[in-house]
Amino acid sequence: QVQLVESGGGSVQAGGSLRLSCVASGLPSTTYWMAWFRQTPGKEREFVAEINQSGGTEYADSIKGRFTISRDNAKNMLYLQMNSLKSDDTAAYYCAASRVFSRSSREYTYWGQGTQVTVSS
C-alpha cells in the first residue's frame, strides 16, 4: 500500500520560510517523479515543483527562485524549502508521485493528505 505523508506546514509572516517534508512508503521503486502541488478553496490544484529520480527539477514560474525541491531516495523523502513567502503562497500543499513527467495533477497516481501553509502579510 502506497502512502505519502506530508508535514511541516504552518503559519508564517510574509518574507519568512518553511520547509515541507513528505515521506513515501510502498512505492514500487524510486523511478518516480515526485512533485508538490498546492490548492486553495474553489480553485484547481496547481503545480508547484517536481523532481525526477536523478535530481532534475522543474518549477512553476510563480515560485521560481524562492522555492527549492529536493529528494533523498535512500530515506524515501521529498522536501520543499520555501523562502520569501508571500500571502499568495497560502494554500494546502500536497506531495504526489507519478511515473511520468507532467505538470498536470491528472498524471499523478499517488497523493498525500496535504499540509496547510498560511502566510500573513
Image: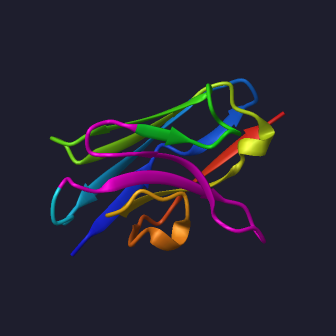
Examine the rendered structure and indicate whether residue 55 appears above or below residue 83: below
Q: Residue at x 37, y 62 (%)?
A: 100
Examine the rendered structure and indicate whether residue 106 appears above or below residue 73: below
Left of 120 or right of it: where is 93? left
Left of 100 or right of it: where is 27? left
Examine the rendered structure and indicate whether residue 93 appears above or below residue 69: below
Tell me which segment is drawn in magenta.
30-56
Left of 6 or right of it: where is 72? left
In the foreground, 93 or 71: 71
Percent from the top left, x then y, of residue 5? 37, 58
Q: Quick one: which residue is furthest to the right in this view? A: 121
Q: Quadrant of the C terminus?
A: top right
Percent from the top left, x then y, of residue 113? 47, 66
* Magenta stretch: includes residue 42: yes
Q: Quadrant of the N terminus?
A: bottom left
Quarter where residue 29 is shown: bottom left
Percent from the top left, x then y, of residue 24? 27, 56
In the foreground, 9 or 78: 78
In the foreground, 64 or 93: 64
Q: Residue at x 76, y 34 (%)?
A: 86
Left of 30 or right of it: where is 21? right
Quarter where residue 63 is shown: top right
Q: Residue at x 72, y 47 (%)?
A: 90
* Magenta stretch: includes residue 76: no
Q: How many marks?
A: 0
Q: Residue at x 36, y 63 (%)?
A: 98
Q: What's the image's color scheme?
A: rainbow
Q: Quick one: which residue is furthest to the front in this view? A: 101
